[in-house]
Amino acid sequence: MVSKLRFKGSKKRRHHSTNHHGEKKQRVGGNKAEIKFHINNKLQSADQINPKIFTKCNWTSATTITDLKEGMPIVIGVARKGIEDNNKIGVISVAHDKLNITIAKESDLKITAKGDSINFLPKMNLESPIYRVEPENIAQIFTVVRVDSILSTKHKVDIPDAEKTYVYIALKSPKTKKFLSHNSEKHTLCMSSTLTAQEIFKFILKPTDTSNFQISMETDGSEDGKSNESYKLIVTDKLKPRLICDPDDLLDDLNQFNIRVQIANCSYAESLIDEINKLQTTQPDQEDAVDESIRLALRELQKSGIKITDKIYYQLKEADKEGKLHEFLLDLKEKYLTDRRA
């Protein structure tokens, strides 16, 4: 019996429709549609993918809003030009004082080997280590808090997550048990014990070659008598986080983030694993049928007095794959009789 492929620590979940990057194509010689998946910049069907790749890394880049589920851990990565080589990528992290926010640099992160990472976004720059980032400690992780129930009517979008292009969420640090927040005086990131408008961020799905989301915030001016303002979260080339007003989108290149999620929580990976498991479910029957036909062929040859060698066994399997097993048996027995008469 073939056991189903699952992620480490994963639980049985409800299925989601997640064919956002997959493309359906017709099977050759069949009526069923074959789903192709974007995986590491290649479009492949499930039977072309080695399942062992899922055991080599734990994190991947989010593909849709569906990946930002309630209570799920995420890593907020950035890829910037940087002054020094080890400053080119970073991760938003809780500082040692547990009050402020800093950027953990590449030397403080876990970077998986190039051949061991797995990502599903199309047109990625796989040379960038941002697609291989994994957290080194709990300070580099935030958990998603969905705030749909407390959003004002103008911010609510009543459609499935799989169809959304943005979502409002809060982020809680498992290290401090506090929320990621906007320091409205310094316009920097900090931590807060309470959940207000200053702790609610808008995640906008907008993939580039090194990022998948933009992050912004809309403040409620009614709290302090000021007008409503919209801020963008940016991380400078020196890896300094700031919240700024940018109505002309002049700093969009600094408002790009690579949101990393655990593969076990990635809806796109889940649909791919489902396809692989379907193949594994049908494979034993196919193998049994092949084994039975080979077994009967071997018995027939033995009854004819033909000695079974490794070469003959291999030729039997190849003939069976090509659908020419019967012809091969006839030719082999005829050759055997001819050799005996000689």
Image (tube, helix red, strand yellow):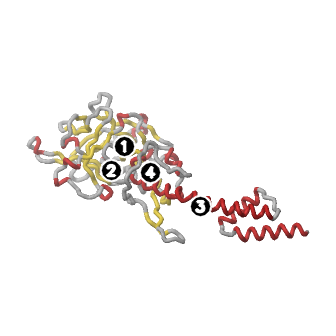
Tell me the residue at 37%/56% (across/down): 16
Q: Quadrant of the C terminus?
A: bottom right
Q: Amino acid at mark 3?
A: Gln
Helix, strand or loop under label 3: helix
According to the image, label 1 marks what residue?
A: 77
Give the label on residue 286, or none: 3
Bin the neighbour count of mark 3 within 10 Å (Cα to Cα): few under 14, some 14-19, many 20 and up. few
Residue farthest toward the right in the current orientation of the protein:
342
Helix, strand or loop under label 2: strand
The answer to the question of whether label 2 and label 4 lie on touching residues, with beta carbons closer than 8 A, is: no
Q: Earlier in the sequence, mark 3 or mark 4?
A: 4
Q: Amino acid at mark 2?
A: Phe
Q: Nearer the viewer, mark 1 or mark 3?
A: 3
Q: Quadrant of residue 19?
A: bottom left
Q: Measuring from the top left, give residue 108's x and y in whole percent.
A: 41, 34
According to the image, label 2 marks what residue?
A: 213
Q: Nearer the viewer, mark 4 or mark 1?
A: 4
Tell me the residue at 41%/49% (across/down): 12
The answer for how far apart the CA atoms under marks 4 and 1 are is 14 Å
